Amino acid sequence: MGEHILEYPEIEIYISNLSPSKLDELGQLSWFECHKRLHMLYQEALLETINGTNQTIKETFLVHGKVKVLVLETITLSVWRHNIFPCLCNIQISKEKVFAVFTVLYHEITAFGLLETLVFYSDCVESLQDTAVELLDYCVGSILQIINRDVPKVLHEKLDELTVQEELRHHESNIVHNLAVKSISVIRYLAEAFEHLPLSITSRFYNNHDVPMLLCKVIEMAPWFTTGTDGKQYHFVDGNWRKRLSTDEAINKSEGQAWLSLRQVLLDQRFLQHYEINDYRRQQLCKLIRHLHDDILDQLSPLAELKHFLCQLSVANLPTPPARPLILELVAEFGDKLLRKFENKWEKLTIKQADMLRDLDINQIRSIAKGLSETYRTLDLVEPEPAKCGNCGEPAASRCSRCKSEWYCGRECQVKMWNKHKSMCTLISDQSVSQ
């Protein structure tokens, strides 16, 4: 695959000018161009990873010292999602303008997905330095969210029955799930780069957040599996729920990342220096041995080391608790500063953003919708999976003939989704005609 989404001069300009969004400017007309640029950078980074080509995106982020910006951007969007999005869902929003709210919601996935792609490399993690504590706290918070809520249902053919507000909340639930699964991978990348980070990050990892127990809980819960409203079993792969097939491997990608993260956390040389293993923790860890059967070990051979460690732990005497060194602890400040800045102002800020939506005229909406539709369509270059039906999620061979932005498996699903799709289709199609 030789295609590129961005040329080098564009990459250089986009990254060098990158700065965190301002919370009270999310959803403004000019902001959508920022989202479009970041999304294209994310797609280009994925394309470079898939092709194994030169790492232009990664190197340019490092040269300009902008990896930290992605952490701050992700946290900004998280604050918006927790404090403004629920209020917006209680405000009547027209179907023509609801995509603007979804775009802000989706921007968190864009920023964090690009960050996940970059921190696979230890030099990108090292460039974070003190900002790594912000990233660690964000990842732990994201994982806790799926531990403390039900796994979202796959709605199968019922999306067309949802109100605008219900559909937004459904998308938010899936985005939260996606962020948590990505966070599990990022936890692993941070652990792999401990030697490049301040010592307080390691201490916070094991003592403040108890990441080993957090990962144990996630693995036991198995939030990468769910049941659809059609009664069928689904698993979470590459950010989407897909039907489980008899030909699927014993362990899917999401579950595999969780196991590899736990392996890295437990087998790291710093583990016993910072982590006290008591009876409860040993019991929880050793419960996982039953999951590490031969099919899983054949698929992910590095887990054999983890199983050996857990089996030894189950019969060994508890190690002497480590003497914790005196460490100057870093504090995650960015999110707290945002919360303090807008304390008691969330309702006012929600009204301001709702007014911004109402002020967008039909031509502006069409222009934004068309631009974003073309940007998202470039995912065809980086997504190895076939297109999915917008209604039932099955593989799809046909696109909407008017806007070319939605896929369907057949006529029946297209008819069922028409009431939902009509507004966006008209916006995009009309904009295409006017250009």
Image (cartoon, helix red, strand yellow):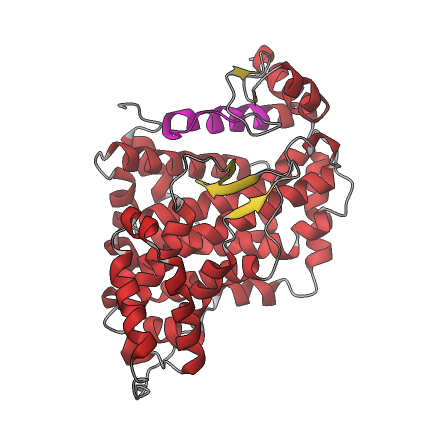
> For residue 316: magenta?
no
Q: Quadrant of residue 206?
A: bottom left
Residue extending farthest left: 54
From the top left corner, tell me how far across and down residue 138 is, in percent. Answer: 47, 61
Question: Does residue 262 lie above or below 404 as drawn?
Answer: below
Front-most of residues 5 and 418? 418
x 41%, y 51%: residue? 255
Specify start and end residues of the magenta stretch as a single range: 367-388
Q: Quadrant of residue 357?
A: top right
Front-most of residues 242 and 62? 242
x 50%, y 17%: residue? 397
Front-most of residues 386 and 219? 219
From the top left corner, tell me how far across and down residue 398 is, in percent. Answer: 53, 15
Q: Quadrant of the N terminus?
A: top left
Total tally of numbered discs in the picture? 0
Q: Quadrant of residue 129?
A: bottom left
Q: Give the dominant element type of the magenta stretch: helix, strand or loop.
A: helix
Q: Could you tell me if residue 367 is visible in this image?
A: yes
Q: Quadrant of the C terminus?
A: top right
